[in-house]
Amino acid sequence: MTEVFLIVLPLVLLVALGQVIAKTGWLAANDWTGLEKLSFRILIPALIIRSIAHSDMTLKTSGLYVATMLLAFTVVGILTMILRIALPKQALGNPPLSSMFQAVTRWNALITLPVAAQLFGPSGLTTITIAMAFLIPFINIINIAALATMLAGRFSVWKVLKTIALNPLIIASVLGLALNIGKIPIPAPMDTTLEMTGRAALAVGLLCVGAGFNMRRLFYLNWKIIWAVAIKAIVAPALVFFLAQSFGLAPMETLCAMLVVATPTATNGYIIARQMGGDAELYAIILNWQLVIAIFAFPVMIAIVQG
């Protein structure tokens, strides 16, 4: 277990460094906004394009791996939506339920990518980017559908769908898939440029995650928060582990899939919650709790799969 913690420790230190830089004011809030945009619009897309273009995307090698995560996200989403039937609206209104749904079905690839890279190197990065290529569109669609049902009339469907279509990560996934399926080689100079650009995404992403952490939100805790955190850290990875054993996935695919579904929710869900009438503050609190719990949950998952 000590070796596992040493693997995760550099990533935790990067997150902590981001928090220190933000709290001391070494970088202004506008600077962090610029870094987040750079990471979201340039660095991660470069990583996605190159990784997917060079990966083995055949159904035989990737189909069951992707299906495992799709099933897991679908199940935890359904479990959360069942609360609408089980509880009266006085106990759980639609705005908080919508944020809980987002919190258990979204994931922040900025966290998962460096963890996979630390564990498995380039193979780990490729395995996560394959997940991103299929999960990002799926997760956005099911979240829009769920929030549209619960928060009807509070947003423009066209505007949200347009935002999804213009998502740099989705565009990068499509480009990577096109290069892969079309067997189109990337010229060596361009390939090196993409590799260097994508490499920067890992550290910058974790620094931004640390900068966005708010310790004060940890003073709030109720059953809604516990539900969303437990689903992420316990239920979803346990379900993936069971499915992976049933499907005969390799240890690397099993662990990467577990990390994906257990990764803290994505920060863009907070913006969507505000735009669509959800409980944005509840979403932010859940996000911060998931970040803290992940520090302990990830090493446990790594130890279980790798022994």
Image: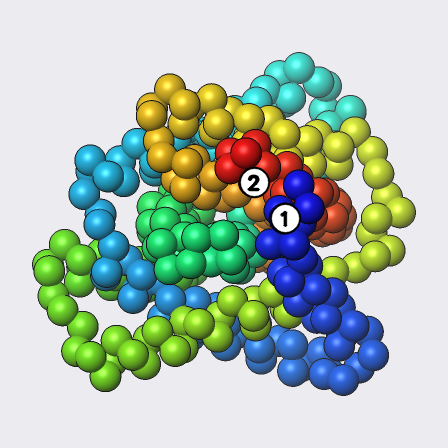
Instruction: Characterize the local packing of mark 2: few (<14), some (14-19) or many (20 or more) Cα atoms within 10 angstroms.
Output: many
In the rendered image, the quadrant that contains the C terminus is: top right
Contact between labelled residues 1 and 2, with CB atoms less than 8 Å apart: no
Q: Secondary structure at mark 1?
A: helix
In the rendered image, the quadrant that contains the N terminus is: top right
Amino acid bearing label 2: Ile
State the colouring used for the structure image: rainbow
> Left or right: where does residue 81 sit relative to residue 13?
left
**Sequence-first tag of 2 and 1:** 1
The Cα atoms of the two marked residues, 2 and 1, are separated by: 10 Å
In the displayed structure, would residue 146 be above or below residue 13? above
Q: Which residue is mark 1?
A: 3
Query: Looking at the image, which is closer to me, 11 or 303?
Result: 303
Amino acid bearing label 1: Glu
Report the residue at 51% width, 37% height from top: 306
The x, y position of residue 106, in whole percent, is: 53, 45
Residue 211, image quadrant = bottom right
Report the residue at 69% width, 36% height from top: 229
In the displayed structure, would residue 278 be above or below residue 51? above
Q: Which residue is mark 2?
A: 302
Report the residue at 47% width, 22% height from top: 242
Query: Looking at the image, which is closer to me, 114 or 79?
Result: 114
The x, y position of residue 298, in whole percent, is: 62, 43
